[in-house]
Amino acid sequence: MPEALITLGSLLLFGLLTFWLGSVTALPRVTLLILMGVLIGPSGLDLFQETREFWFEPLATLALIMVGFLLGGTLNRSTQKHHGTQIIVLSIGIALITLLTVIAGLLLFTDLPLEVTLLLGAIATATAPAATAAVIDEQKESGEFGTTLLGIVALDDVWGLLIFSLCLAFATGAAVDNGFSIFSFGLQEIVGALLVGVALGLPMSFLTGRIQEGEPTLIEALGLVFICGGIALWLEVSYLIAAMAMGATVANLAKHHTRPFHAIKNIQSPFLVLFFILAGASLNLETFMDIGLIGGLYIALRLIGKIVGGWIAGRLFGMSGSDARWMGAAMLPQAGVAVGMALIVGQLLPEHADTVLTVTIAATALFEILGPVATRAAIRRCK
């Protein structure tokens, strides 16, 4: 117990240091927190090894549940009225163009099996909502570009899971029944998460505004949000999507819907600081030595796919030239969802596990560190 408290206190103070570093350097706070984690992780000083591994999963879950709820809150009537259709088509368009770019490039320049190229293409569509939202929040004034970006990354996990489920079904589906069962499992995860979020969002919408502002609202909001995440984990559906569905339900149905969002936003900072530092500490930079041509090509293709996808989809669906040019770059951060997809591939296709896991983990480490830099640059150009 003393070691755990010393670890948490030290990590929070390390996080405090990055607030100052962020004000005197060109790097966003998210990247600095992750780099701080790399410094104390196995690629650096390897501090707090036992307690660090113990705390990462529960803190990551708590942080992402709160991020999901806040992201869902951005999908309110006002956003839907001004950007609703645009957000949906942009998010689908960028995901599909990224998928096709990575698949085509890997098929053209490597001799990887078709199923591996499909799966790497699907993994490339995943983004990092927590990192993107944190960079937008740090910038204070992000304008319509930031609002649209938040809406897109809020939907990215849904499209990413669907695309990955389809590609995984094809890759493993020598037998039609097997392939269909894998796709249906992915669909059940999304639909189940949406049902959990809406089912808990409805009573929360009724309660919000009837309870006194301040601490009572905070207790109510945290209680329901954590219950939402717990039920989603128990049912083995996406707790991030469930929390987003809950947030969207409250934002669109509650009379005083801003209260719980403000309450949670005011206390999420320590959780996010710990989450990003521990995420950095979980990275092993030695994987960069193993990715070779395939890994380098995958990284380049994902970068091209996101940027070109953002420009094409943006121009087709009404964005200004500047916003369209920068939208894909703003979506470069990538984190745990991609690694989770790679782990599933490792379980179901063990013969391709080494390739998919090594490339994904190395690429995720790179995009987790450098992606927020691109996001901040994009927001500053377009706000």
Image (cartoon, rainbow, N blue to C red):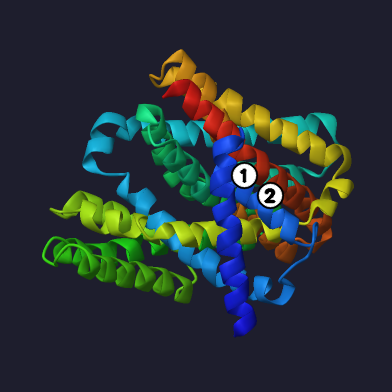
47 or 188, which is in the foreground? 47
State left or right for residue 216 relative to residue 98. left
- Which three-letter amino acid code belongs to the residue tagged 2? Leu
Q: Are marks 1 and 2 in contact (CB under 8 Å)?
A: yes
Residue of label 1: 31
- In-image side of 94 versus 144 (left or right): right
The residue that appears at 64% across and 46% down in the rendered structure is 368
Residue 59 vertical position relative to residue 301 in the rendered view, above or below? below
Q: Position of residue 227 (x, y in %)?
A: 36, 73
Left or right of residue 89: residue 355: right
Q: Residue furthest top?
A: 321
Q: Which residue, given by chain and number where applicable, does mark 2 sit on? A: 35
Q: Position of residue 186 (x, y in %)?
A: 52, 59
- Say whether residue 183 is visible: no
Residue at 71% across, 48% down: 365
Q: For the residue labelled by badge 1, is the local secondary structure a helix, a strand or a loop?
A: helix
Q: Is residue 229 above or below residue 126?
A: below
Callout 1 amino acid: Thr
Image quarter of the C terminus: top left
Label 1, label 2: how many angstroms apart (C-alpha)? 6 Å
Residue located 77% across and 52% down the image: 356
Q: Position of residue 296 (x, y in %)?
A: 81, 36
For residue 307, what is the image quadrant?
A: top right
Q: Is residue 31 above or below residue 91?
A: below
